[in-house]
Amino acid sequence: MIDRYLLILLIVLVLGTAGAFFLLMPILPTLIVSVMLIGMLAMFWLGLHVARHAKVADDGAAESPADEWTLSEHAR
């Protein structure tokens, strides 16, 4: 029972702190920073996802679609 009260108190404390922060700070720069951080986290996650799903050739080199587009083949 005390856990529920502590959880409710924690939620009120976090919401109150966030509300006080937004009363002092303008919302536009805060949103811009938040979007930039979310974008960086998304790119990091995308890099991890691509690295986990990369195909590895027999010689240990990673295969990628860029390997098909070499300058020597298309320069002729």
Image (cartoon, rainbow, N blue to C red):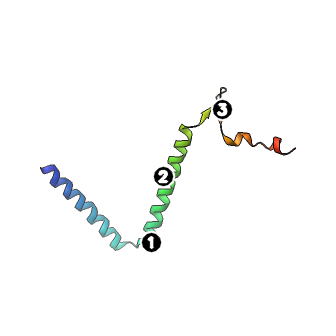
Q: Which residue is mark 2?
A: 41
- Label 3 crowd (10 A; few <14 / some 14-19 / many >=20): few
Task: From the viewer's side, name the closer residue of 43 and 66.
Answer: 66
User: Residue 53: x, y in percent?
Assistant: 55, 37
User: Residue 73: x, y in percent?
Assistant: 82, 41
> Which amino acid, mark 2?
Leu
Q: Which residue is mark 1?
A: 28
Name the disc covering residue 61, or none.
3
Q: Earlier in the sequence, mark 3 or mark 1?
A: 1
Q: Residue furthest top?
A: 58
- Label 1 crowd (10 A; few <14 / some 14-19 / many >=20): few
- Label 2 crowd (10 A; few <14 / some 14-19 / many >=20): few
Instruction: Identify the residue shown where x is 65% and y is 26%.
Output: 58
Q: Is residue 13 left or right of residue 43?
A: left
Above or below 75: residue 59: above
> Which amino acid, mark 1?
Leu
Tags 3 and 1 touching, CB below 8 Å = no
Q: CA distance from mark 2 to mark 3?
A: 27 Å
Tags 2 and 1 touching, CB below 8 Å = no
> Which amino acid, mark 3?
Ala
Q: Secondary structure at mark 3?
A: loop
Instruction: Identify the residue shown where x is 47% and y is 62%.
Output: 35
